[in-house]
Image (tube, rainbow, N blue to C red):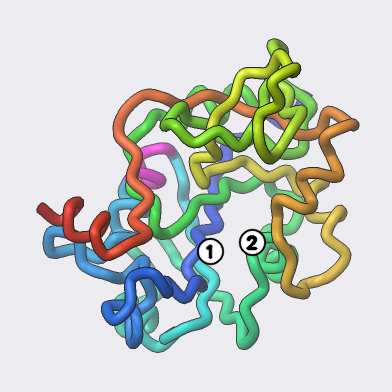
Amino acid sequence: MNSLKPIETAFVLGAGLGTRLRPLTEECPKPLLPVRGRPMVEYVFEKLAVGGIRRFIVNTHHAAERWQRQFPDHQWQGVPIIFRHEPMLLGTAGGLKNIEDLVGGETILLHSGDVVTNFNLRPLFDKHANGEAEVTLALRDNGTKAIGLNASGEIKKIGRPDANDRLDWYDYANVAIIDPRFLQRIPDARPRVIADVWRTMLASGGLQGCVANDGYWHNIGTLEEYENFNR
């Protein structure tokens, strides 16, 4: 069984280029784009703080100075923020390895900085705490089918559904719990796609999913989505 110690650190992904939102992101990281008068990432921080998170780690790359300008005291409403700059984009897996020294032996929450949602984190926390998996992905039934889940909650396929399989298919909600054991699977802090690391775990049972269909969920990736969400 995983540790029952509360998860208090979140790694919020803030280093992406946001190319589909250009020209808005030419001089601004996507998570800092305003949504109804507030930076998008503040909705993420608010949701995580309500869920018990007490420390944010944010990776930066493009227009990193904007993060410093937005949060000059390195905190949001009293919750400390640690920035870890990536001179070269490392991807999610490389980015995780790059903060290994900051998290030590902690289990952490991974959350995209451009996903605005209010689904309840408690079932995700409980699912991870009561199992042996190294990684627990939050999954949603939003029409995209990319993660195949068996009846026991184990993720058995990443990709496209097979007509002959008996898996339940969901989309990754860009939120996950990461056990420190998982970081040992990443050899170094070089650019790496995290899904490639997850695929190596499919046979071992170290990867599980938790369906989170409650509340709303928005991945603001295009100009049209951004404009619609602001309206």
In reply to whether residue 48 is colored magenta, the answer given is yes
> Which stretch did the figure color magenta?
47-51
- Image quadrant holding the N terminus, namely top right
Q: Residue at x 34, y 39 (%)?
A: 217
Q: Amino acid at mark 2?
A: Thr
Q: Residue at x 38, y 46 (%)?
A: 49
Q: Which disc number belongs to residue 92? A: 2
Q: Is residue 168 left or right of residue 60?
A: right
**Residue 152 appears at what percent x and percent y?**
72, 13
User: Can you see residue 72?
Assistant: no
**In this figure, what is the number of numbered marks?**
2
**Residue 44 appears at what percent x and percent y?**
36, 52
Q: Amino acid at mark 1?
A: Ile
Residue count near mark 2 (Cα–Cα under 10 Å), binned few <14, some 14–19, many ≥20:
many
Q: Residue at x 61, y 81 (%)?
A: 86
**Residue 80 appears at what percent x and percent y?**
44, 64
Alpha carbon distance from label 1 to label 2: 13 Å
The secondary structure type at the circle numbered 2 is helix
